[in-house]
Every structure is written in C-alpha cells, then in structure tokens.
Amino acid sequence: MAKVKKQPRPKAETPKGFRDYFGEDVAERTEMLGQIAEVYHRYGFDALETSAVETVEALGKFLPDVDRPNEGVFAWQEDDSGWVALRYDLTAPLARVYAQHRNDLPTPYRRYAMGPVWRNEKPGPGRFRQFYQCDADTVGAPSVAADAEICAMLSDTLEAVGIPRGDYIIRVNNRKVLNGVLETMGLVDEDQRAAVLRTIDKFDKVGEAGVRELLGKGRLDASGAYIDGVGLEPDRAEPVIAFLTAKGNDNAATLAQLKEAVGASGIGQEGVDELETIASLLDAQGYGADRIVIDPSVVRGLGYYTGPVFEAELTFEILDDKGRKRQFGSVAGGGRYDDLVKRFTGQVVPATGVSIGVDRLLAALREKGRKGAAPAAGPVVVTVMDRDRMADYQAMVSELRAAGLRAEVYLGNPKNFGNQLKYADKRGSPAAVIQGGDEFDRGVVQIKDLILGAKIAENASLEEWKSQPAQVEVARADLVSALREILDRQGK
Amino acid sequence: MAKVKKQPRPKAETPKGFRDYFGEDVAERTEMLGQIAEVYHRYGFDALETSAVETVEALGKFLPDVDRPNEGVFAWQEDDSGWVALRYDLTAPLARVYAQHRNDLPTPYRRYAMGPVWRNEKPGPGRFRQFYQCDADTVGAPSVAADAEICAMLSDTLEAVGIPRGDYIIRVNNRKVLNGVLETMGLVDEDQRAAVLRTIDKFDKVGEAGVRELLGKGRLDASGAYIDGVGLEPDRAEPVIAFLTAKGNDNAATLAQLKEAVGASGIGQEGVDELETIASLLDAQGYGADRIVIDPSVVRGLGYYTGPVFEAELTFEILDDKGRKRQFGSVAGGGRYDDLVKRFTGQVVPATGVSIGVDRLLAALREKGRKGAAPAAGPVVVTVMDRDRMADYQAMVSELRAAGLRAEVYLGNPKNFGNQLKYADKRGSPAAVIQGGDEFDRGVVQIKDLILGAKIAENASLEEWKSQPAQVEVARADLVSALREILDRQGK
C-alpha cells in the first residue's frame, strides 16, 4: 500500500459486526454480573481475568499453519510475540492459565470469569463479533460431585438474578450414556457415530418418528427438502429410541430406563451410575426435579464433552418474531471435558464447567420485567433561568446528590428554556427544578413533575389537572423533601 | 511462512506485556469501579461501553499511511472493514460515538466509561500493554460550570472509594493563563513556546532558581549532566516566575497574582476569569481549598488541552523502592479539549473530562489499608473423611451458603487428609469442618479454626492452647452458629 494522500473525513462507525452499549444496558449487565459473581463467590469460586490477547499457539484451536491464521479469530502478528489473537472464549485462556500457574493454584481450582470474547464470523442480525461470556469451571476434580455442584450453583444463580423457581429447568445428561448406547448398537465407524449423534440432537424438533426416519433411509422435512438418513436397519435404531424416550416421571424412573437402554455397555453403565450419584447429591441438598432433572435429550456440542452435560432452559413462554408462542429456551450450558491442559503439559486434568449466555439471560430478565421495565432512571434536571446564578443552581444539585438523588444542572446554552425541557425529556428526567429571579427573591422554587406532566398532556381532564398539578411551588428550603415526595409518588 | 510441521507443546504464557488478574485483585477492582460508577451516576452521567475494536480511520491518531499502521496500537487488516485496531484510550471511541449518534444523544452528553485499553508499547516492569481506564466526560457544554462539576465529582469519587478528605488535593489550572503568560513574553516561535512549557512542567523538581537557569543559559542537573536552556534574556523569564509563584494562601490571593502575571493578555485574562468562576462555583457547593485548589504548577500534557486542566494528587506519604518517603502522587487528571468530533463532522464541540488511573488508585487504597488488608477471604472448607458420604458434606456446605457463608466441599482426591488441610491453607480458609464416621454416628462435627491454629502453631503457650483450642467439637445442628462465632472472632 502506498502513502495515502489527504484523507476525507473519517466515517463515524464501528467496524462491521461490532456495537456499543449505552446507559441502562451497561448498568443492567453490570448489576446482573455482580449478582452472579456473588453466588459464584459463595460457592468458593475465585475470579480470574485473563488478558484479551493470547498467543495463537496458546489458544490452540487455531495453529499458525497458514500465512494468516484468521479463521474464526481476530489474529495478527507481533514482532516480539509472533501470531497473537483476541480470545474467542474463556475456556482456552483458563487452560493456558492453569498450565502456567498450576504449581501455585489450589487443586481443585474453582474459578469464574466474565468478559467479552471475540469471534471473526460473518455478522448478522443479533449476531455480533464481540459479546460477553460468564463462565465457572472446576479444574482438577475428577468426582461428579463437582458436576453436581455446578448444577446446584447454576440453579442458585438463575434465582439470584431474578428467574423465579418454576420458570427454569436444568437438564442433566451424560455423554457416557450416549456412548454406551452407540456401543450397544455396535457402531464403530466414527462418521456413522457422528451422524447418529446429530440425529439425536434433532429429537426435540422431529420427535420419535422423525428420529426413526433419520436413522433409517431419510426424511422429508417441513420445507419439502429430503434429508438423507444414516442408513441403519430399522431394528438397529431401537437403542437410540429407548435412550431418547427414557425420561420417566421422576429421576428414578429415568435412571431405570437408561440402565436398560445401555444394556451391557460398561461405559454406558458408568454413565448411568454417575447420573445416579449426581441426582442423589442434589437431592441431599434439596434440589428436586422441579429445578434439576435427568433428561436424555440434552446432547450439547458433539465432540467436546466427556461426561455429564447440562443445560439450563427457561420454560416461560414468549412471543417470537411472528407472534407465535414459544419457550424462551436455553440460557446456559456446560459439562465435563478432560483435555484442558494436556496440550500444554501432557498431563490429563479433569474439568467441568458452565457458561452463561449473558445477553440471552439479560433478554430473559427484560421479558420477565425484571430489567428495563423501571420508570425512567434519568436525573432530576435543575434548569438555568439566569446564567449568572449558576452557583445557586450548582448548590441545589449538590444538595440533591448529598440526599442520594440523581441530579444535574443544565449545562447547555440556557437561552432557550424550551430546549432545557426537551433535554430533560431526552434524559428521561422525573422532574425539573426552575428558579427564576422572581422565585429567587421570594425564596421559592418551582418543581415540574415531568412524568405526571406527560400523562396530563396526554389524557387528563381539567379536574385532574387542577387536583394534582404537574408543577408546584415550594420553599427553597423544602426542595429535597418536595422532590423526594414527587419521586416516591412516581414509584422511584 | 510455509506450512508448520508437527508442533512442539505450546508454551503456557501470555503474549509479552500482558498479564492475568487473580481472585481478590479482580474483585477489588470491580468493587472500586462500582463505587465510582455510583458517584458518576448520581451526577447524571450515563454509562457507555464501546467495542474494543475500532477502525483505524475512526481512531484517528494512527492513519494507515504505511503498510502496517502499528505504531502504538494493535492493528490488523480485515477483509470487510479494512484496518482495525484495539482502542488505545476511551476518548477516541467517545468522539466516534458522539459523532455517530449526536442526533439521538442528549446535548450536553455526560458519559462515563470503564474498561481495558491496549497500547502497543515496549513493556517494562509495571508497564503493561493492556490496562484499565475509567473516564467521565461532558460533551457539548461550553461553560466552565462543566469543568467545576468534574472537579467536584472527582472529589466525591475519591472519598467514595476510601481516600479520606485531607489525603488528597485536586489542583486546577487553565491553559489559557499559560498562553497568556507566553503572550505577555512576546513568544511567538512554536519551538520556543514548547520549550518554555516543558520548563514550566519541571518547576516541581527544580524550583524557582532551576526554572530561571533553564529559561536562560542552562543548568547542571543533579546527575552532573548539563541541560541546555531556552536561551531567554534573564528579565524575560519574569512573567513565567510570576506565574509559577502565583500560588497564594487562598484562591483569591492566587487569582490576584495570576491576574498580574498575565498582564494585558486577553486570553490570559479570560483564563483567570474562568478560574475565578470555577472557584466560586465550587465554593458555593462547599468544596473549599482543602479539597480543590487553584494551582499554577499543574500543566498536564502540553498539546491537548485548551482550557481548564485538573489533577488529583494523593498527599499521604509512602516509602519508595529505596525506602525514602515520598508523596503518593497523581491518580487522576483531565481538562477541557475542543476538537473531539471535528475530525468527523467539521463541527467544533467543546468537551471536558477526567480519567482515573485505575491501577494507581487501587494501589493507593492498598497503601491506605482500604483494600487487600482484610483477613483471608477464603471459603470454609468442608473436608471429606468418607467419600461415600459426599451427599452429607454437600448438604453441609449448602446449609452454610444458605446462611450467607462462603463455603465449599473438598473435591480433590480425599485419600490423604493432610492434602485437604494443605488445600484449605492455600485457599486462605478461615476454618475447616471435619466429620468422620465416628462423629457422624455421634451427630457432631469438628471445626478447626485455621487462623487461630496458625497463630498457635507459631507462638502460643500451652495455657493459651488449652484455654482457646483451635479445634472444637459441636453438635451437627449447631454447625452454622458455631462457624459464625469463629468467623466473628476472627473479625470477618
């Protein structure tokens, strides 16, 4: 590239697929992450904040075997560090940290992490290249007690942020049970195993008959397209169906049917035993099947997990884009994976963890009216009637702040009073304070209730207007108490 | 670069100049930023979180006039967005956001931002390539009332995070006064003006006599090196000296002397008037010179600011690396700058703001014992004496957590009990809970006070050991209350 000549004005926009968060969106996320951190901390998890930039070598999945290892990640080359990239999740950095500091960290190491991750993928509506993750993992604990703990913690977390019991369910499955089913079927071909797993993942959508078709010759889907099947003989599909329909009325019934589904498979039996242990551990702590339940239909990412897997679903209904009711769906998931640090040290270290979809959970809280539904959280605006008396206006906001009220003085050009009220409106202000020279001489202030004012402007009768005027005059000394009263009336 | 052959094991380390933050370091920073956000919010400032990645074009300072515009920033090229880079501060993204959304944002726009920024600079001891900034800016407010507000807010913020009044001072100066002094001197040559400004910045170190020498022929510094002077005739230095020594016993005295120092300079007079307004606005809100003071020695960054500048210094003493006492120094600073969005829109928009050095302020709070001095915040560890009774141990921690105590069960291999206590020690646990088969049968638990235990191990007499044993046996039903008592005794 040659020297660039005099530049035109730069475009004021983010790079493609990136976005900004404003005001309450930031504050609400911060609040929610704080509530989550409190639960994690109580469970003995410690915070970890890794650098946003990692060496491509440490990230692992993306080795520098081409000039630009830029598939899926944002990567570039540094003179002193070689290829580096923005982290694409919080698990790869955990692996690096644990390998790097394993002699200083306690084992088991319980850690939580919250922060942005970056994916170099094609952006689309609602799909961004930078988004938040919030993870908790236990490294170095082989026992499924660690998995049970994660499930219990996830349940507590959802309730702590404001999802009521009954509005969510945490489903638990075990990859070993699935592997046992495949073993029972005598499937050894990797491609065929993968195809069966993909089919199992579709059970929610296509049901038992659909799975039978997809395991066999194939299936005409709703759009009219023909989907090729795995090509198994009809009776070989039975273990899969037995597995998928193993969910009984309670965990004991489900476990009994899973035991049958895995037949003589050793790994399958081990998986069922683990699920039984998890269920009994949770039961002892009072987490019943109304919160955490064994459910064979949970598959979650095909290659990654090696043991228990879990998924938190919100069960209340929302309206989709087309106005149809549907369940809100998954907001968190995780499971056990075993090769966390092996790449670095050669040592196998067992780990289990959960990742919460921060944006999805925030959206759910908004649906439930737990966030975003509060009346405007804007500041009280003290208007400027006389620019020479700025000190008086500043003293007013100072008093209001000292009393814990959010308040500011208008700092734009005060000439046009209408602009000041427009500003207050844009800020979502609950009230404006007005003191001109006349009011100053009489030792009073005017307070304009902007919420009530807007309501009255819309639809009040003359009587209502008179009985509850949107603007009151109070003694200057009563400014704080009068504003408090108005804000209380507004429900703030 | 050709295809890379089979890789050796990757190194488990961050790229050069990057670091990780563990446990309390993360939690303490989060807490401090939360306290700061609360003050900012009360002042009417709204949160803004921009994307970490910006187009190089929007960042501005670093135009793509070379193949790799990688001077000072981490930059790389994307197919669909051209050259992009990690943000190097929080002001450049604010400029982009304000230009992009100026029709939707209120004017004035008060915003705060907190988050990491990245600098592609040579790393060194204590100098990292990713660090936190915490900024508050008011965009579109030409009045110095906005500057006064920032100073008041900075004062409230320092006290809110735990710096007591008297341990900090906010110094305010005005670049216009400085420019007035230069005008009075008849200095028009840009290089000479810059040299004088650099000299002024050294006043703290070299004093009045040193400044006289540096403005004249030059000076032999402490190390024996000769520093060339600006080369002014001795009497031409007088306005600078008058300016630098203008600080009086109170703001009124300082302002009177500054008025003299700027003589007939229009811009200088304007600057003094602005400082007078700021002082009187702050005075009206009760911010006296014990918190915010006019001080001509504050220069802050030579090219950037166009009006008032301010700096928060912590005045308490710490010991430096060599054990000598020195003041802690600057933790925040800012001022007025006017070409924020001009690059994008051609429009001049006045702005003023402050940036808090997050790491410096945290370090200060640690020095003051406000952070990091709390007794170990580790969890109570419930040990595993009998792995078949994991459900019982889980039920115990569940009870403890429900009572608000931080607690966890040991999830490593329980075979070696010594390892469990070593683990508790590494975790900074205040207490361990022990229940073997015998205790279980008798319906009791043992609680080991690990803080007291460590103390006793160090230096207790036999009598002390007997009178306040580090291990007590309590009824299982009393587990929570007994632990509470021990934690209270430890001061938690």
Image: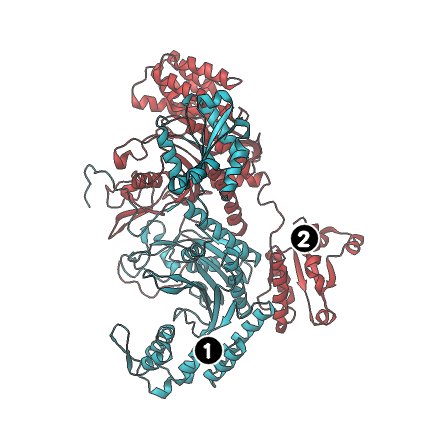
Chain colours: A red, B cyan
Per the image, the residue denoted by label 2 is A487
Q: Residue at left 63%, top 49%?
A: A375
Helix, strand or loop under label 2: helix
Looking at this view, is A79 or A222 the one in front? Answer: A79
Vertical side of A472 occupied by A81: above or below: above
Vertical side of A380 occupied by B406: above or below: above
Say left or right for A438 vs A118: right
Chain under numbered label 1: B
Residue A489, image x, y percentages? 71, 50
Residue A315, image x, y percentages? 55, 30
Residue A321 seen from this side? no
Please tell me how crowded label 1 is: few (under 14), some (14-19), or many (20+) other residues with Cα within 10 Å: many
Helix, strand or loop under label 1: helix
Say left or right for A468 vs B294: right
Per the image, the residue denoted by label 1 is B177
Chain under numbered label 2: A
Q: Quadrant of residue B342?
A: bottom left
Contact between marks 2 and 1 (CB within 8 A): the answer is no
**Total marks drawn?**
2
Residue type indicated by callout 1 = Val
Residue B451, image x, y percentages? 43, 40
Residue type indicated by callout 2 = Leu
Residue B317, image x, y percentages? 42, 63
Q: Residue at left 51%, top 68%?
A: B292
Q: Quadrant of residue A182?
A: top left
Q: Residue at left 35%, top 61%?
A: B320
